[in-house]
Image (cartoon, rainbow, N blue to C red):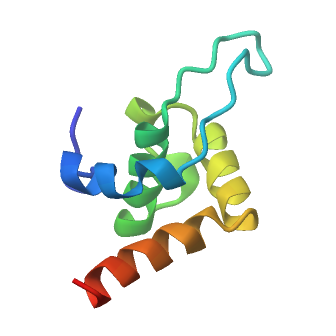
Amino acid sequence: MNYPTDLTDEEWNQIKSLVPAPKSGRGKRGRPIRNDRRTLVNAVFYVVRAGCAWRLLPKDFGPWQTVYGYFRQWSQDWTWTFIHDTLRDGLRYS
């Protein structure tokens, strides 16, 4: 399903090289981890724009715990800062 907060192809192409690859393998319950980078970013944008709790994230994005885990990891490793700075510089110097 598509949401109004989803990235367009053009937007995704601007940041995809800055988003680390998600972990592969299996989750706690032995289920395969199927999240791709774009879905994870779209999920974070959904929560931020909607202002909802992580637990209210639509199931289309995968388990909220997985999305929150990546959001937290990317916050700690400066991924969000790199994305912000790249987009800001692109606007500032265009």
Q: Nearer the viewer, residue 89 or 50?
A: 89
Residue 72: image location, x then y, percent: 70, 58
Q: Nearer the viewer, residue 26 or 77?
A: 77
Q: Going by the picture, which residue comes out furthest to the front?
A: 93
Left-right relation of 31 to 13: right
Q: Quadrant of residue 9?
A: top left
Placement of the C terminus among the 4 image quadrants: bottom left
Placement of the N terminus among the 4 image quadrants: top left
Q: Nearer the viewer, residue 22 or 59?
A: 22
Note whether 6 is above or below 61 in the view shown.
below
Residue 35: image location, x then y, percent: 52, 29
At a point 37% along the width and 74% down the height, the residue shown is: 87
Residue 22 visible to an observer of this rendering: yes
Residue 58 visible to an observer of this rendering: no
At a point 69% along the width and 30% down the height, the residue shown is: 23
Q: Going by the picture, which residue comes out furthest to the right?
A: 28
Residue 17: image location, x then y, percent: 47, 49
Residue 59: image location, x then y, percent: 44, 32
Q: Quadrant of residue 73?
A: bottom right
Q: Nearer the viewer, residue 57 or 39?
A: 39
Left-right relation of 10 to 27: left
At a point 68% along the width and 22% down the height, the residue shown is: 24
Note whether 74 is above or below 2 in the view shown.
below
At a point 65% along the width and 48% down the height, the residue shown is: 70
Left-right relation of 79 to 25: left
